[in-house]
Amino acid sequence: MEQHLIAIDLDGTLLKDDKTISSRSYDVIQKAKAAGHVVVIATGRPYRASKMYYEQLDLTTPIVNFNGAFVHHPKDDSWGMYHTPLQLETVKEIVEVSRKYNVRNILAEVMDDVYFHEHDEQLLDLFNLGNPNVYIGNLRDILRKDPTSILILSDEQNVGRIRTYLSEVHANVIDHRSWTAPWHVIEIVRSGIHKAVGLEKIASYYGIPRERVIAFGDEDNDIEMLKWAGLGVAMGNAIEPLKAVADDVTKTNEEDGIAVYLQSLLKL
């Protein structure tokens, strides 16, 4: 049996729309582990908001969080911790300029600390998963550490203008992408950081060659990971640009697409 590294995104991929893992997906992942394959989570979520799924799947592997900006092994401190944050001065410049685009809010995450530029009850509920330390105030004053990522919440019509500014002024130090509706959010991480960076570290650790890496995803933050993996699989509900670069397409997250694909491919 050739050992494979199986990288799984969470939202819209492993998780059903109600944010649960189906019994079929759970069972197939356990069978994959029992057969000797290595299963890892690769998500844009912080660790505090993915820990419950890591534990539910009874994983004992490293995890990729913040789209690759934070990679660590929850059960082995000796494995190493790779944190690649943004530069604080760059973030403060972006906060200053964002005022002219009438942004709704800006959030900065420093690992498990969340900083809100403006008070927002709806967002507080959304980002409270995992009980982070929450701070509210002008980010230019209260943010003292290099943030892992920042999120700009904007009106839909301004997303393009803001992203154009980011590309023209900060392209050499940041990467950015936008979320899909209903959230008009621009997510910013350090330049060159994406899920494939973390996945490559993990594959190297286990001595698994790239051609035996299987990656599943559904959104544009999965593009680099699916392109890097030997077998990049887009979910049936994935965005079209991801399907265009994927090696294959499986069923949707509601149809247990990961389980269906792994059962067939690995004869589980």
Image (spheres, grey):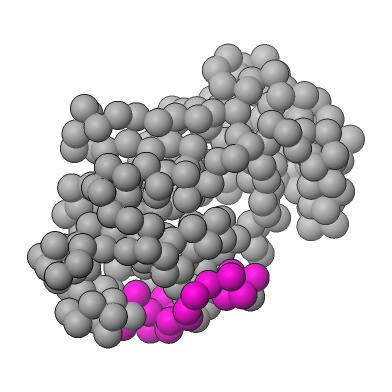
Q: Is residue 156 above or below residue 142?
A: below
Secondary structure, magenta segment, majority class: helix
Q: Is residue 232 above or below residue 76?
A: below
State the image coordinates of residue 127 (x, y, percent, origin top left).
49, 43
Residue 83 position by quadrant: top left
Whether residue 253 appears in magenta in the rendering, the answer is: yes
Residue at the farthest left position = 34
Give the magenta-colored segment's residue range.
241-260
Query: Is any atom of residue 211 visible in this view?
Result: yes
Q: In the image, residue 99 lies at what x, y percent?
A: 84, 33
Is residue 256 at all visible to an observer of this figure?
no
Query: Horizontal and vertical percent for residue 103?
Result: 78, 41
Q: Quadrant of residue 215?
A: bottom left
Residue 2: quarter of image? bottom left
- Quarter in which the N terminus is drawn: bottom left
- Between 166 and 99, the one lying in front of the other is 166
Which residue lies most toward the right here? Answer: 100
